[in-house]
Amino acid sequence: MHEARPERYAHPAFQARCGRSGLHLPRVALGLWHNFGSVDDYGNARAIALRAFDLGVTHFDLANNYGPVPGSAEENFGRMLREDLGAYRDEIIVSTKAGYTMWPGPHGDFGSRKYLLSSLDQSLKRMGLPYVDVFYSHRRDPNTPMEETLGAVAHAVRSGRALYAGVSNYGPEDTRRACAILRELGTPCVLHQPKYSLFERTPESGLLDVVEKEGLGCAVFSPLAQGMLTDRYLRGIPADARAGKAHGYLRPEQVDDARLGKVRALAVIAEERGQPLASMAVAWVLRDRRVTSAIIGASKVAQLEQCVAAASSAPFTSEELRRIDAILAT
């Protein structure tokens, strides 16, 4: 069993209140989307997770299909809980989701009540848990009534299989409606999880305003743009990078000269600020007071440490923000 560092809560400002709820999330959370599956090195994954907890990262974010193979990230995290972190379960926020393809047939994808609740039961079994802290509808299902999808999420909370309800990848109007449905069901939505980064600013077009008005927390994912906003791609695609893996979501064609030019220009600003580009990219999403937490991925302990340090980095000056916007506009 892992013996956690007593200093892990030495910086209370690292824990942020999630909207108007009583839930608190670390400013930087660990996502298990990549590097925690059955194809990955378990010893490395374990080292990253334990170091994260020692740094005050109490939120571990999963989904049913994280791997590969789908489900294996939850299995591996369940092993970590069982062998290393079980004594600290009441300090840990475990979130999972259902909404993307998990098994064949019409009830293995999207947002039916059957899929969401069956998936959650499978997730709990894989992790060896009686409940998760947050259960998300992973995406809006255009072919299923939202009342059915959110009704399943609410049932998960009422039945004790989850403590809080959340939505992910919902647009502004769908988020507003989801909040109204969940309020009416007596299980208010407390958390939204959108994609947000220097290269993906869609949430600024209405979603962050809705999050604030509805009193939600906001845990953004992919703040490093699948690893693009790091120093790793400044000289091409490393063999062990996501864009170099057959099962990665970042494809080599996405790492083009125009995008790399912007990455290099942003790296200059990061260097002037005295921090790695990854740390600056995380700090940039956290600069918005409507963002509660940034969910980062890491393939090495050192990468994790860079990202966690972003929570205590210097505020951006107006000139730095102007220069960043100018780079992104080119």
Image: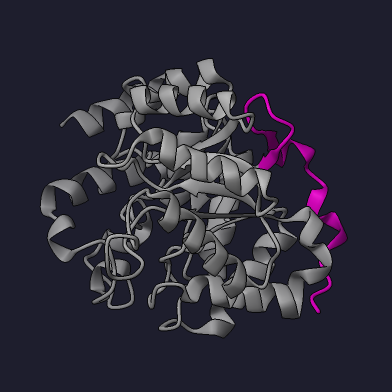
* Quadrant showing the C terminus: top left
**Rendering coords of residue 61 (x, y %):** 55, 56
**Rendering coords of residue 184 (x, y %):** 57, 23
Nearer to me, 199 or 89: 89
Q: Is residue 159 above or below residue 208?
A: below
Nearer to me, 240 or 168: 168
Q: Is residue 138 left or right of residue 93?
A: left
Residue at x 27% of width, y 78% of height: 239
Q: Is residue 319 above or below residue 99?
A: above
Q: Is residue 309 visible?
A: no
**Rendering coords of residue 126 (x, y %):** 57, 74
**Rendering coords of residue 178 (x, y %):** 45, 29
* Quadrant showing the N terminus: bottom right
Q: Is residue 294 left or right of residue 99?
A: right
Residue at x 28% of width, y 70% of height: 104
Where, by quadrant of the figure, is residue 103 drawn? Answer: bottom left
Q: Which residues are magenta?
A: 1-25
Nearer to me, 59 or 78: 78
Q: Is residue 51 visible?
A: yes
Residue at x 59% of width, y 33% of height: 190
Q: Is residue 259 left or right of residue 9?
A: left
Q: Spot the residue most to the right.
A: 6
Magenta stretch encompasses residue 24 = yes
